[in-house]
Image: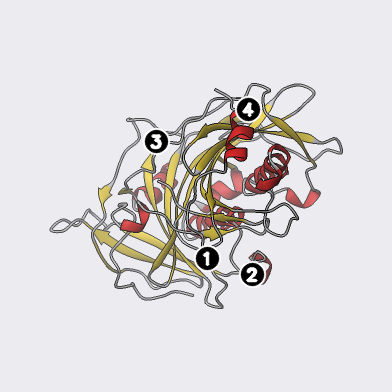
Amino acid sequence: MGREAPAHPPLLRGAHPAARHQGLDRAPDGERQLAPGALGDREEVRHPGPRAHRGQRLGHRQPEDPPQAGHREQRRARRGHVPPGGLRLFEFRCPLRWSDLDAQGHVNNALVVDYLQEARVAFFKSGPASQLLDEGIVVVGHQVEYLAPIDYRPEGLDVELVVAALGGARFEITYVLRQGDRPVARARTVLCPFDFGANRPVRIPDDVREYLGAHLAEVEPLRELATPRLDGRGSATDLFVRWSDHDSYAHVNNSKTYDYIQQARVVATAQWDPTMARVGQADSQHLWLVARQDVDYVAQLTHRMEPFAVLTAPVRLGTSSVTLASEIVDPGTGTVFNRGRTVLVCADTRLRPTALPESTRVALERRLVA
């Protein structure tokens, strides 16, 4: 399902005003999204530093190769300069499912990372990077900023992606998700080739590096969303991993982590203050909009009959927003598998940000983790 190049300017530089202002999306539990502003096993891998090679800045584009089903590639280059071989933007049209929708008829915020994965797999499979899927690759971290609601449309959702950084053993992919001319989300994923037999990261193969390098572009990064580590603090919610949550590597798929953190967040916040209950629950008085969600992947999570735990705690309060930190842990050993950060915005029934109710602020302040 290829498409012609749209007339709107590229957003991957972060130049579109919607990338800096508030938009909206909704979740099935009553949360909705409003824009604000990983790795191997036992070791945390951070985002590539200054050594990671940065590519050319994006500008104009024109068609390159004929698209395969579901995607097409475009060339973009700086004005007056065309890098050797051209600079290619990869585009993928992601089908939507009716089951992706929430009670308000919009896509759940946790589903966005699933769409990122579909686009990423199509990108890998269109060239030599497909070997990464066979030999092993892990997600180090996701950053997702929500800009506008995602509606159900038969034509699906368009995803544009480029490689934003290319290091020795890890790389970054940046995405813009669109419906028509409207950007609905921006995101960034850090990935690392991984040898599961040796339990260690490996270097990017030369042919894969060449393929990724052909899609390298300079991209404005998303702002960092720093939160403290919980170290056992916060409200604990049981997490039962389903067998169907596994991916082809027999570990929990990275996209499921957003689902786990969302479920724990809904339970914990309603316990802290009943008025934070989501739409459809008896005590619901406000709408809670998801503005931003980031996750770091620290260790591989697998299926077992005993529950894991998700710790959730408020770490920062604004006039109308609260930033939450989350950790998925083994309650018996204290092993941390994932760390998450979520920005929630309190809104009225017209979806306008409104000040946190005093009772809610008091309840959250009581549980703040510094």
In this view, which residue lies farthest toward the front?
Answer: 358
On screen, residue 279 above or below 237? below
Residue 105 shows in this picture: yes
Using the numbered discs, state the Cα–Cα distance from disc 3 to disc 2 in whole angstroms.
Answer: 35 Å
Name the colouring of the figure.
secondary structure
Which residue has dot 3 on it? 167
Give the quarter of the image for residue 137.
top right
On screen, residue 103 above or below 258? below
Within-10-Å neighbours for mark 1: few <14, some 14–19, many 20+: many
The kind of residue on which mark 1 rests is: Ile
Say if mark 4 contacts mark 2, CB within 8 Å. no
Q: Position of residue 284 (x, y in %)?
A: 68, 53
Within-10-Å neighbours for mark 3: few <14, some 14–19, many 20+: some
Q: Position of residue 127 (x, y in %)?
A: 46, 57
- The mark nearer the N terminus, 2 or 1, is 2
Which residue has dot 2 on it? 97
Which residue has dot 4 on it? 366
Within-10-Å neighbours for mark 2: few <14, some 14–19, many 20+: few
On screen, residue 330 above or below 292? above
- The mark nearer the N terminus, 4 or 2, is 2
Which residue has dot 1 on it? 150
Say if mark 2 contacts mark 1, CB within 8 Å. no
Say if mark 1 contacts mark 3, CB within 8 Å. no
The kind of secondary structure element at disc 3 is loop
Within-10-Å neighbours for mark 4: few <14, some 14–19, many 20+: few
Q: Left or right: where does residue 105 sit relative to residue 281?
A: left
The kind of residue on which mark 3 rests is: Gly
- The mark nearer the N terminus, 4 or 1, is 1
The kind of residue on which mark 4 rests is: Arg
Using the numbered discs, state the Cα–Cα distance from disc 4 to disc 2 in whole angstroms.
Answer: 41 Å
